[in-house]
Amino acid sequence: MIRTTLAAFALLAAPALAQSQDPIDPADWEAVLEAAEGQTVYWHAWGGSTATNDFIAWVGEQVSEDYGVTLEHVKLADTADAVTRVLSEKQAGEDEGGAVDLIWLNGPNFASMKEQDLLYGPFAEDLPNWDYVDVDGKTVRTDFTVPTEGYEAPWAMAQVVFMHDTEDLPDPLPSAEAILEWTKENPGRFTYPQPPDFLGTTFLKQTLIEVTEDDEVLQKPADEADFDAVVAPLWDYLDALTPNLWRQGRSYPQTGPDQLRLMADDEIDLAISFSPGEASTAIADNRLPSSVRTFVLEDGTLGNASFVAIPYNSGSKAGAMVVANYLMSPEAQVHAQDPDVLGYGTVLDVADLPEEQRAAFEALDLGVATLSPQELGEVRPEPHPSWMTRIADTWTERYGAGQ
Amino acid sequence: MPPARLPLWLRLLPPLTLLAMLGPVAAGLGGTLLPAFGIYPAAGMTSLTLDPFRDLGDWPGLASAIRLSLTTGLVSTAGALAIVVLFLAGWSGTRAFRLLERLLSPLLSVPHAATAFGLAFLIAPSGWLSRLLSPWATGWERPPDIAIVGDPWGLAMAAGLTVKEMPFLLLMSLAALGQVDGTHRMRVATALGYGRIGGWLKTVFPAVYAQIRLPVYVVLAYSMSVVDVALILGPSTPPTLSVQIVKWMGDPDLAMRLTAAAAALLQLALVAGALVFWRIGEIFAARLGARWIASGSRGARIDTLARPLALGAAATAALSVLLGLATLGIWSVAGFWGFPDPLPQGVDFRSWMRFAASGGGAVAQTALIALAATAISLALVIGCLEAEHRRRRPLSRRGLWLIYLPLLVPQTAFLPGLQTLLLTIGLSSGIGVVILAHVVFVLPYVFLSLGDPWRAWEPRYATIAAALGADPGRTMRAVRLPMLLRPVLTAAAVGAAVSIGQYLPTLIVGGGRVETLTTEAVALASGGDRRAIGVWSLAQTAAIILPFAVALIVPAWAFRNRRGLHG
């Protein structure tokens, strides 16, 4: 009895082992599809937003129907948790069948995973839907200045916009300086998520590129520059801003959505967002008052792409590639751009799409509070990821640990 | 008659129970101790060093975080204890007492996170109370810019903990009261002319406190190291030490795990220090109290002031939890709800529909973990109690301390270590280890809940059963367990409630991949979507109330034709 059970186990285990040792060639798409069928993909993605959770569930239904891939959303409080997980597995020698199959990431997490050889690839530019991606017009081949080299596939474009409640702040503010002036006249009505929160750190970087003289130096690692001198204007700015923040800067919202809640409660009138369509989506979902609109700064705002990457020890690489490819499909992209769903910008070159799909994009009503691509204006490149880490650390020392 | 020799399995159960309860705590503390001194093989660090403590010392928020952990823990424990004692002293035996007691008991089952969310929305400057009073009474067209929730002194957090721990201490005190014969003591005191509160404090309280001392210590240790309540109601610049430990644990830089381990040891020392401080306080209070008792003052005047105060405080606590739950209910179906509208502009069931569509997995995992952890705990506890009964050796004082130990060691001090250890020995985290981690916390409560009714069972039934030819095993299965169905199910319900409410063990030992109602509710809290928070918190509360309902209904049904067994 025991022996037969063991034999059955061996039989079951054998093909699974063979499969994971067999290298898959992303260029041979038919083979990828074949290997992917029946695989389960654990997608580790931030789980704090109902809208993204719903979108990921929708993607799961699609890939299950079309490709027989089961998608499980592992809801993270912090993307770094997934990076830690893969790193711990590597150190423990678990080089196959790891817990993470797909990660939603960008910036420092990508840089850190790529540097430590934790990623599978290159695969992204071999995916069939890569052909539709707007390689020239959008920053889809660098991630915070770090070349992606096919180790991650883009699936959404993000750009900084400011949300303002037109009942209390009717007109857009053109610059960081104008924001400072406005908070002086309206103390307690603006705040940003507490760094090292991603969006909070983005506000610091957005302000840094506004107040610094020299943008070029931000494109290189922070160690190669005189960090203190470059960021000094930022701390001057924040020293002036902080007393006029919500709760005098003694308390901060913990995340982006937490900040939306404050706006809905009329505790603040101005908030930062990294998604031009977020305000419209939140209005449709009753999470923001209908009087909210968005604006960008005159000199342009930071923009970047959101990516998905596959850890080197994933046991379902083929399935993960199928999901990554599906995310770049016109069908998924138009769904993601719908403000009733996510309101995320597309990574595709819409003008180059086949007629029917282009029409679907053009028919999309972007929502009351979303700026048109022309209005969004100039996209400023992200600084090198090392700036983000150091700025967040220094911020915590200066403003985040009680004075 | 010498006690019969026990069967082997029964002899093994008590040590096995101790192992299940204390093993993970000891292993976890070990797993914390090593990295705190720089030994962390998973990250390639193997040399003994004090650097983690130095890094901890360099963290600019350390002093504030320590102060917060100490003050919130001591203030909330003292507050909860004071309200419970004054309420018992001033009102026990009255109709108001019975009413509030009935209100407070179910509040015990409201999870910490749900209590905290409800309270946060109730008292925030833009919260429900403020909305109900604005602008007609307050003149506020916009919410005032005051930090009520997340205040730098942690007062909101201490209030939340006080409100939440009060029902627990009250129930513990009521159980103790039954054993010390408070009614007779009070009768004597009243006859001697003592006032209600003064007499109770002088004659009943010392005996009651001796019984509830360990539960009070548990409340103190828990309040000092709680994470979910601190995340929701506590300050963030800096947060409490426990919250910061969890943040460091989640840092992509593995070296931060060492700082987290050092901080966890500091947390352990803080809790130990606070317990010693409390003990010294007890001694002082006892000395002062003895002098006060010896003075013979009748203290009749205390009543006029303290009785209404006690009733007010207890009622406020009960009402704030109930109102908090009500706001969660309203939020879960709210359309847009801006300030200062007293109610939402419309009704919207989208959040409940989302929950119906995607909540099944979390519900199933929650149920599976709770059932498994409770079943294991119940089996171990019944085994221990039966062994204790057959050996005729009641639980010693030291044994009681051992049962309470897992509840006295701060969770943040040993859970991170346990996870590191599991990773180091290559045991991937998953639902199995989460169940075992839950047993650590479920077991003590099941033991405490079942112990007294088990021991109070009339042993002559066993004699009769033996006379009829039943061996001890059959007596237990056929007579004792059926007769004790009600307390067994109540203990199971308490155990399930404890398991369902666990946040940190599920999160840390499960590696973030085991999704339960509680972890989802707290994760959603970071997203700030109050409709979803409302839905998940209510689902979590319902999941905890369900086993209690079963514990009420099943015995009633099973004993429908056994009049003598209706309690």
Image (spheres, coloured by chain):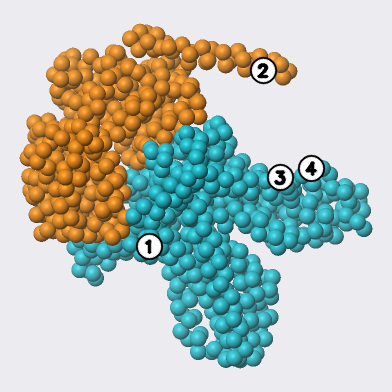
Chain colours: A orange, B cyan
Secondary structure beneath label 1: loop
**Can see residue A356?**
no
- Who's the residue at 45% across and 44% down the image? B258
- Any mark on residue B138, and which? none
User: Do the numbered discs 1 and 4 sit on residues whose CB atoms are within 8 Å?
Assistant: no
How far is the residue under mark 1 from the one under mark 2? 58 Å
Amino acid type at mark 3: Leu
How far is the residue under mark 4 from the one under mark 2? 30 Å
How far is the residue under mark 2 from the one under mark 3? 30 Å
Quadrant where the N terminus of chain A sits is top right
- Who's the residue at 47% across and 66% down the image? B74
Secondary structure beneath label 3: helix
Question: Where does label 1 land, which residue?
Answer: B154
**Which corner quadrant of the image does residue A350 belong to?**
top left
- Who's the residue at 59% across and 86% down the image? B291
Q: Between tags 3 and 4, which lies in front?
A: 3
Question: Where does label 2 land, which residue?
Answer: A6
User: Do the numbered discs 2 and 3 sit on residues whose CB atoms are within 8 Å?
Assistant: no
Q: Between tags 2 and 3, which lies in front?
A: 3
Within-10-Å neighbours for mark 3: few <14, some 14–19, many 20+: some
